[in-house]
Amino acid sequence: DGSGNPMVIWGRMSDESVFFSRWTGTSFSTPVKLNPTGFTVATASWMGPDIASKGDTVYVVVKQTPENLSSSNIYIIRSFDAGITFSAPIRVDAIADSISRFPTVSIDEAGNPIVAFMKFDSKFMNSRWAVAKSSDYGSTFSKDVKVSGWSGMDAEICDCCPGAVVSSGDVTAMLYRDNLKNIRDIWTGISTNNNTTYTKGFRADNTNWNINSCPASGPDGTIIGDSLYTVFLSGGSGDFRTYLSRSSISNGKASTVSPLTGSITGLSQQNYPRIANSGNAMAIVWKQIVNGRTQIPILFTNDIAKGFSTTIENVDLNDNTNVDVAMTSDKVFVVWEDDNAGTITYRTGTYTPSTTSVKDEIVQGDFSIYPNPASDFIEIEPDKYPGLITIYNQTGANVLEAESQERIDIRCLPSGVYFLKIGNKLSRFAKL
């Protein structure tokens, strides 16, 4: 919430309900059932309702059951007081006789919800991902826009895998598992104009997983500057392993794709990764099975530019299912399902934010930036200057990354003075 306190939702399969609880400063509040009597929602250990917040504005999206009926729709439930009170469900999808499932939600800079969902025709065919946008804080929604289908003419989507919609500034990324002739890699549809249009998409996963059935495991992601960080499951190596990729949004391609861990003695399976960031700090959690026992590991860094620690800590051992993670500027929150106790369990940790100065060990760049000042794009001269381009603000925070290129899109940056770094060389420019 606006005070940095965690808010948690979870589903209960026995009566198809969704519950909410918030941290009050000393404990979690008494759980509140969000779906009204007679209104049931889809929930399982691997999918269900989703939550997003900005300050004290909270949005929860649900799929009404039975899932296979066109009369069962996607709804949003909202709060403007950090979850003290919630509205009645408000319908999101206006899709006639089509069928929907797997809602996911994000929030734009103005505090409006962005809702994505899987969409089928009336015969449960022609699957695709769609996004609907609100400009009145969830009171009404625009007609949904198709955001999948970028891998080829024969592209489908993996129709039992949830997706994730993430946003930053005017950029929104809809992450989903694609299905191109049983190659089930992670792709993303991209909007750079606050969900007005989706004009491109690209593969965030190069593991080439060929499998003839849906693995029922979706991606998660976060955006820092021009970089989209995506976590996902793949069996492309022959084993179920979790991965992290970093993609350039402006270039439309993944620059790195790496497994979250190296070789672990006794490791048989990994799944259900989740990712969160606060500024340049980042945390990743997932579930794995080692020597027949379940674990919830966590990877953390207070500065993603420096990479993750080589040490992987376990948040919990045994009897755990799915896990999620959230962050503030100095705390990490992890929540998971405890199978043995039949409870939702929570842990928190603290960290010191990175204080890296862009002036440390920097050599004045022998390249020029023009125009300077600039309002939308900048160019580097010489234009073939090699290396990863990193842009920092005046506090030293990494706000944008791009591969070497002639033009760099800076429209997502607020007005101010910035430092552009290539290797260990630095030049300054102003954004109007």
Image (cartoon, grey):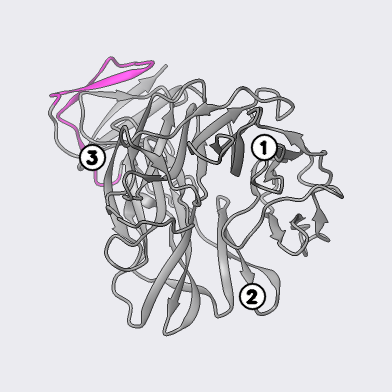
Looking at the image, residue 103 lies above or below residue 25? above
Q: Nearer the viewer, mark 2 or mark 3?
A: 2
Looking at the image, residue 221 lies above or below residue 148? below
| Drawn side of residue 89 relative to residue 258, left or right | right
Which sits in the foreground, 280 or 79?
79
Looking at the image, residue 45 lies above or below residue 79? below
| Drawn side of residue 305 relative to residue 117, left or right | left
Q: CA distance from mark 2 to mark 1?
A: 33 Å
Q: Residue at x 29, y 20 (%)?
A: 378
Callout 2: helix, strand or loop?
loop
Q: Which residue is mark 3?
A: 388
Q: CA distance from mark 2 to mark 3?
A: 44 Å
Q: Which residue is mark 2?
A: 339
The crowding category of the residue bearing disc 3, from other C-alpha atoms within 10 Å (few below 14, some 14 to 19, many at least 20), is few
Q: Residue at x 35, y 33 (%)?
A: 150
Q: Earlier in the sequence, mark 2 or mark 1?
A: 1
Which sits in the foreground, 195 or 333?
195
Whether residue 379 is in magenta: the answer is: yes
Q: Residue at x 52, y 49 (%)?
A: 162
Q: Amino acid at mark 3?
A: Leu
Q: Residue at x 78, y 60 (%)?
A: 15
Which sits in the foreground, 366 or 131?
131
Q: Which mark is residue 70?
A: 1
Task: Give the residues in magenta.
Answer: 360-383
Quarter-wise, where is residue 330 in the image?
A: bottom right
